[in-house]
Image (cartoon, rainbow, N blue to C red):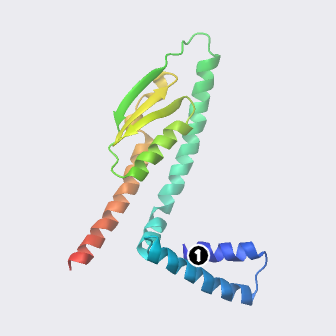
Amino acid sequence: MYVIFLLLWILLNGQWNGEIICFGIVIAGAMYGFFCKFLDYSVEKDILLVKKLPFILLYILALFWEIIKANVSAIHLTLSYRNEIDPVIIQFQSGLKSKIAQVALANSITLTPGTITVAMEEDELTVHALDVSLVKGIDDSVFVHMLRRMEAIDEKAMEKRRKRHVQ
């Protein structure tokens, strides 16, 4: 977060020299201190975010790929004279523990054409799909697997934090 503040400072100044960088270092440090003190942020969260960054980038790539595949499927369904569109509403348990992961899954489903998340309660999602073929294996999708891996990183970090507090 500190580096982002510093880069934002330099970017918004439109130029960079020694004076701007020195002021940026001080101002970015003050902003980072404010975030840590009043907004429940910490260096540990920065480190955790850096550890999860490759998974987040892979998730975004997988999301783009799934959007492309769903576009092709939706186009095929709507333009095909042989296939009859059979809308369906399904409910499934995601098995995800954190709200952030559950919301990311719901938004990813909604972003893929032909499906929309209608409701989300606890870890149960209700999804409307243009056709039953679009929701086959949705409870065991690539999104769910990748979000579970990211949750595992969070759980390991929480376990380390608990061990440090106990000692």
Would you say 6 lies left or right of 34 here? right
Q: Farthest right residue?
A: 15
Neighbour tally class for label 1: few under 14, some 14-19, many 20 plus, Cα within 10 Å: few
Would you say 1 lies left or right of 42 here? right
Q: Farthest top residue?
A: 82
Residue type, label 1: Val
Rendered image quadrant of residue 155: bottom left
Question: Of residues 111 and 156, which is closer to you in this image?
Answer: 111
Question: Residue at left 37%, top 55%?
Answer: 151
Question: Residue at left 56%, top 83%?
Answer: 29
Question: Residue at left 34%, top 57%?
Answer: 152
Rendered image quadrant of residue 112: top right
Residue 66 lies, with reference to residue 129, above or below; the image says below
Q: Position of residue 58 (x, y in %)?
A: 52, 53
Question: Residue at left 65%, top 17%?
Answer: 79
Residue 62 lies, with reference to residue 50, above or below; the image says above
